[in-house]
Image (cartoon, helix red, strand yellow):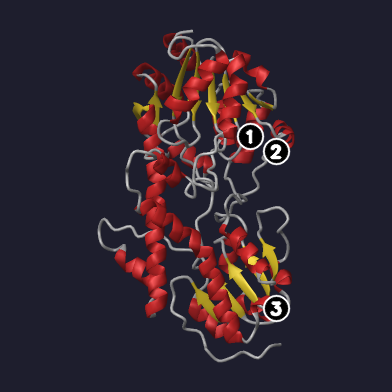
Amino acid sequence: MTLAELRKKIETKDANLAVIGMGYVGLPVACEFANVGFDVLGVELIEERVDKINAGISPIEGKEPGLVELLQQSISSGRLRATTQYNELIDRDIVLIDVETPIDEYHKPRYEALRSAIRSLGPVLKDGALVIVESTVSPGTLRDLVVPLLEEESRKQLNQDFYAGNCPERVMPGRLLENLRSMSRVVGGMTPETTETMKLFYRNVVDGDLDVTDSLTAELVKTTENAYRDVQIAFANEVALICEAVGGDVWKVRELVNKVPARNMHLPGAGVGGHCITKDPWLLAVGAKDKEVPLRLIPAARVINDSMPMHVFDLLQDALEVAGREGDDARVLILGYAYLEDSDDTRNSPSQILELSLQATGAEVSIHDPYVLGYHGDLYQKARGCDAVIIMVRHQEYLSLNLALLKSSLRTPVLIDGRHVINSEQALEVGFLFRGIGQAMISSKTKIDKN
């Protein structure tokens, strides 16, 4: 099958589609293409997830407007189904790869899932199929890893027996469908003709711009944009630390800075999590390995952002000391275990780091999260008898906390806010010993009697 023939099949929606990896990216992508008329087969190795999807049940627990309805519609129409078997991909004209691409402890890419997907796909790859990597990868990965391995496993030749390209996803939990439809995409094929075919394909579901380029540029753009965010967040966090030290308020500073045209100071907070920002800067940096490029800013930003959960830990220890409570004897409630508000995604969550640090001191830790399984329940009941509450995630539910009721449940009235959820003056009026990211230590320094 030539690219011209594939384009005709795309135009008539007769091109059979496969999506490898039915997670936060693959599931909504599969649903969107099924919804517009394509036959879509989702490949997922977790059998329980496959069963849920085929039953029209979304395995994603967080708030995802429209996803459940779209999934049910796609399944009931017969245009979407999921499987664990790669051999069912033998008739697929277009294959999207949406698998995890983490890094190891040395900040190097771990492509086990990507390699596994390619090795499983190769033997059943249809002649003339188009393979698109949507996962975020380091610059040069399509050229140096994906294509050579796919040629080896399929015994086919690029641009003769199959085609390949890179179109990095740009979605965020909580806004998966909205982002998928409205965000611009960078479309990079291994040849200009491949790129134009990919653009025709994505136009079926993407209302935003489709910017055509080559695969290397597409890989660079995605890793650069997340590295940019990480650096900007690190700057905001460092300003927050300065504000605490000199007695300022970073939230007021940020508000006034951003009134100046072309200024966009990001949000400081209790740490950066998720599957993208914590690793993509390193994916970008690895492209400079052995190239004698001095890397200073990206590693420094990573250090700052990775340190923020421990800064929250330090704020807690300071407050407990003022309250006359020993840290190793404290009972602490963490509010929020996901890395992002109104999501169930716990990948690289700062709360995990904080939990482990608290447990290492001997503290007793409880966790509440309205979206993460295992941590549901009555927030105020979980707070009963605790010595401190730490807000780590800006979930909608936490924006309307009953501070008086929360204080009455605690043994020691310590409140730590890592996400600017609480009005500090209101917390002090209620009687909390309050600490907040980027805010001066304005609460009372008087020892609080133990209850």
Q: Is residue 431 visible?
A: no
Q: Which residue is mark 1?
A: 71
For residue 387, side relative to residue 252 (left or right): right
Asked whether, in this view, residue 5 is left or right of residue 254, the answer is right
For label 1, the SS is: helix
Instruction: Say if mark 3 contacts mark 2, CB within 8 Å.
Output: no
Circle on res. 57: 2
Amino acid bearing label 2: Ile
**Residue under the point 49% across and 68% down:** 420
Q: How many marks?
A: 3
Q: Would you name the residue on which mark 3 appears?
A: 329
Q: Which mark is residue 389?
A: none
User: Is residue 279 positioned above or below 97 on the image?
Assistant: below
The answer to whether marks 1 and 2 mark residues whose Cβ atoms lie closer than 8 Å is yes
Q: Residue at x 61, y 76 (%)?
A: 403
| Mark 3 vs 1: CB contact within 8 A | no
Q: Position of residue 354 (x, y in %)?
A: 60, 64
Q: Position of residue 26 (x, y in %)?
A: 57, 34
